[in-house]
Amino acid sequence: MHKDESSEFYIGYQPQGPAGIMRYVRLRLILLAATVISVAILLVYGQRPFADSFFDFGNLQDFEGYVIERPVPLLMVEKIGAPGSLPVRRDYVLVAEGKHGAESIINGFNGKKVRLRGTLIRRDGIEMIEIAGGSVQAIGSKSRSLSKEGGAVGKYILTGEIVDSKCYLGVMNPGQSKPHRECASLCIRGGIPPLFVVRDAAGRKLHLWLLSADGLPVNMDVLDFVAEPVEISGAVEKIDGKLYFLIDPVSISRLKM
Amino acid sequence: MSHSYRAIGWNRQKRNYDLLVLSFIFVYLGIFIGLGAFIHPNATIETMLIRGLGTCALLMLHVILVIGPLCRLSSAFLPLLYNRRHLGVAMFFMALAHGGLSLFQFHGLGVLNPLVSLFISNLRYDSLSGFPFQPLGFLALLILFLMAATSHDFWLANLTAPVWKRLHMLVYVAYGLIMAHVALGVLQAETNPVLAVLVVIGVVMVMGLHLIAGARERPLDVEIATAGKEELIDVCSVNEIPEGRAHIATIYGERVAVFKHEGRVFALSNVCRHQNGPLGEGRIIDGCITCPWHGYQYLPETGMSPPPFTESVPVFNVEVRNGRVLVGGVRVESKK
Ligand code: HEM
Ligand code: FES
């Protein structure tokens, strides 16, 4: 205890506190400052590592390609190289701004070649475009559809986490697990395609787009199971290099109560 | 001129206090967000802001909660108590920024009203690990808002001190809600133990200091045996009371401050009209009993604040016999 306690008396509205008390207070304030700085540094380093994701916020780019409406909205972009080389194809999953899917924006453009502006999102090799409102324009009259090469892989029971693809791929980071649950639910409710993140036998991460057994969106049926460990049984299909998981939502079960 | 409450205006100590609070906030957020952006380049800036503001508010809340018991343990902490309500209001604004940003980030721009989404986007109210932690933060923020909004002495005077005091005791409810908000929220996904360990240290410190301060106070409340209410009770010897200061005793279930000043002895209620500060730990300055918390003053003879102020505290009958101080029933009731 400080020794001036018996004689000094602090009154806040006097211009200056008593010297002994103020010396004591200054010492405590230095301790407090040290605590504040240490807590800040500890908490900076004490955060779980952040995923390597990318959201090109603020940088709108032009993209040209073919719109594919289903099973998951895509922009199929072909890059023609030098004469004699094969074209390179890249697929971008399409979403709208905010917590909204692209469905209403690309409605009527299925198979058509379009030009659109948007922001690039990328994680784990999956690319996505957040379409800038009103920027989709049809160009040319050629049309395309997905090939059905590959097709059925088999029936599986898989465990993993259902995430909203937009946040998970980089718009938010972290964009998954418990603290993100409400957001994921709202995004999927708004039409953002749900993605099922699982691990294969070698421990590698795999990403499967969740669909109903008929290959239609299941968004509204998975809301209650997002952002937590779940087990789902269904049929895996591979179309153009992408994995789809065709499920009956009734088969989703929680691993943690 | 009638003063229903005393507006404590700005003064140098308050300005210094507020400047310090602001610089601590800047240092904390600067390190958290500046160093954070450097160490975690992949984290989005909103995440850093939300986390920085939330943890800053929580740290401030801990400081606020330990100042009380620390002042009970040593009067040298009183300068930190003097302007604590500004610290409280600043903490509310940090929490508001955190909550507002979270509400926008996690519930905005969607197909539901953000406030609806806050309550229905996670419906696992039946689960512990899955429990919706954000509504807990929202409730805590409402309480902090009520407290910040009524923090001015205007409200203290208009709600009356007991109601105001009870309202501001809700800070402990808010503290509990925030602890649950953190434990059921980020801590469910965090793999690094730092935040969990800091939170446990914080809770132990807050509870420990309150228990210790409470234990120190308890002997004060041991009542001196009394027969009838009008009887004079021997509370201490005159020599025990230092000049210009008081001895605190409990009679008839009430704490009484017995002051000695210029050869006379005065007994008044120990409870300051302002915010229930312990008058008996105050001093007599310029002939007035001066509260140790915010410096409200009362005349020892009448219990009245010197004009133009109108506060008053009850005064008790007091007699000195053979060097012993005897205190009895109320002589002058409080005026309000
Ligand atoms: C409307 C009210 C609130 C909402 C919507 C809210 C939302 C959130 C969310 C979503 C997180 C997790 C963020 C993350 O991923 O890291 C979080 C964490 C946190 N919140 Fe709140 N919160 C609210 C009120 C409060 C209040 C009043 C406090 C009081 C100090 C508070 C303190 C914290 C703390 C300390 C954390 C952990 C820091 C961290 O994120 O690492 N929150 N809150
Ligand atoms: S409690 Fe504020 S001056 Fe006494």
Image (spheres, coloured by chain):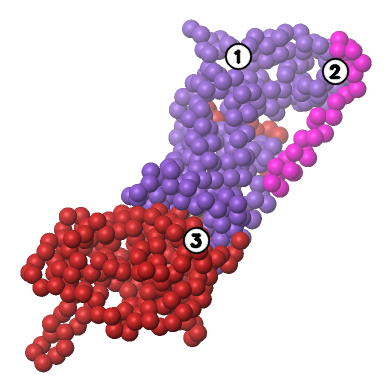
| Residue A147 against residue A66 in the figure, above or below | below
Indicate the amino acid at tag 2: Val
Corner quadrant of residue B30: bottom left
Q: Amino acid at mark 1?
A: Glu
Report the label total. Answer: 3
Q: Nearer the viewer, mark 3 or mark 2?
A: 3
Residue closest to the eye, B245 or B5 = B5
Question: Is residue A137 placed above or below B87 in the rendered structure?
Answer: below
Instruction: Give the x, y percent position of residue B24.
Output: 47, 48
For the question of whether residue A160 can be seen, the reply is yes
Asked if both marks, 3 and 1, belong to the same chain, the answer given is no
Left/right placement of residue B138 relative to residue B254 reads left
Q: Are marks 3 and 1 in contact (CB under 8 Å)?
A: no
| Helix, strand or loop for disc 1 | loop
Chain of the residue that carries numbered disc 3 in the rendered image: A
The span from disc 3 to disc 1 (Cα, nearest Å) is 60 Å
> Quick check: A97 left or right of A172?
left
Q: Residue at x 14, y 90 (%)?
A: A85
B212 inside magenta stretch: yes
Quarter of image, res B221: top right
Q: Tag 2, which secondary structure?
A: strand
| B229 within the magenta span | yes
Q: Going from the N terminus, do you reach mark 1 or mark 2 first?
A: 1
The residue at which mark 2 appears reads as: B325
Residue A4 visible within the image = no
Could you tell me residue B187's position as x and y percent? 56, 59
The local crowd at label 1, few if under 14, some if 14 to 19, many if 20 or more residues have their Cα within 10 Å, is many
The residue at which mark 1 appears reads as: B311
What residue is rendered at 13% in x and 82% in y?
A80
Q: Which residues are magenta?
A: B207-233
Q: Amino acid at mark 3?
A: Phe
